[in-house]
Image: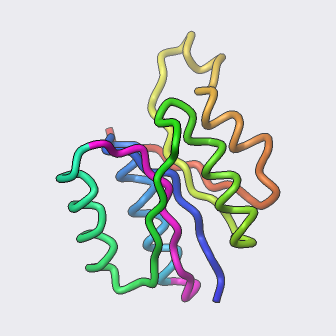
């Protein structure tokens, strides 16, 4: 079975990434590995319920360093031979567009598989 890895946080861009990963998993009959930076039990419970409702086979992994989840996203993708990674991007100001978030940039540049970057609805 193919695998999609998604970087998730309890922010609009994390929700957008999860939604897209679930939609892609349904299209491709894939399983999902979610790498999260959640700290509160209620957030983890909400994530687990959302994944259970999707009906997709899934795993939830914790990013050991919540400030640097890119390492675990990349490692999970490599270990699972993922088809691709889904990450969420936040909207940026004109100046901010010159710089990409360090985690997103690291995933985009260092991933051994394709990366799909999605934006949250405004």
Q: How is the image coloured?
A: rainbow
Image spot of residue 8 (x, y percent): 44, 51
As for residue 35 lying within the magenta part, the answer is yes
Q: Residue furthest front?
A: 64
| Residue 2 drawn above or below residue 107 | below
Left or right of 12 in this view: 59: right
Image spot of residue 1 (x, y percent): 64, 89
Q: Residue at x 52, y 68 (%)?
A: 33
The part of the chain drawn in magenta is: 27-39
Q: Residue at x 33, y 40 (%)?
A: 11
In front of the other: 89 or 3: 3
In front of the other: 38 or 98: 38
Left or right of 30 in this view: 110: right
As for residue 91 lying within the magenta part, the answer is no
Image spot of residue 80 (x, y percent): 69, 72
The part of the image, by quadrant, that contains residue 81 is bottom right
Left or right of 18 in this view: 30: right
In front of the other: 29 or 36: 36
Q: Is residue 116 visible?
A: yes
Q: Residue at x 61, y 52 (%)?
A: 73
| Residue 107 drawn above or below residue 73 | above
In front of the other: 64 or 16: 64
Q: Residue furthest top?
A: 95
Image quarter hosting the C terminus: top left
Q: Is residue 120 visible?
A: no
Left or right of 18 in this view: 97: right
Image spot of residue 67 (x, y percent): 50, 30
């Amino acid at each position: 079975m193919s695998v999609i890895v998604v970087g998730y946080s309890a922010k609009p861009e994390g929700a957008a990434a999860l939604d897209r990963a679930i939609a892609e998993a349904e299209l491709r009959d894939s399983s999902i590995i979610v790498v999260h930076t959640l700290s509160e039990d209620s957030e983890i419970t909400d994530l687990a319920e959302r994944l259970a409702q999707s009906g997709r086979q899934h795993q939830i992994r914790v990013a050991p360093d919540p400030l640097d989840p890119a390492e675990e996203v990349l490692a999970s993708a490599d270990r699972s031979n993922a088809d691709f990674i889904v990450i969420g991007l936040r909207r940026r100001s004109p100046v901010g567009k010159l710089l990409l978030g360090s985690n997103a940039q690291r995933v985009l540049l260092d991933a051994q598989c394709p990366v799909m970057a999605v934006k949250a609805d405004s």
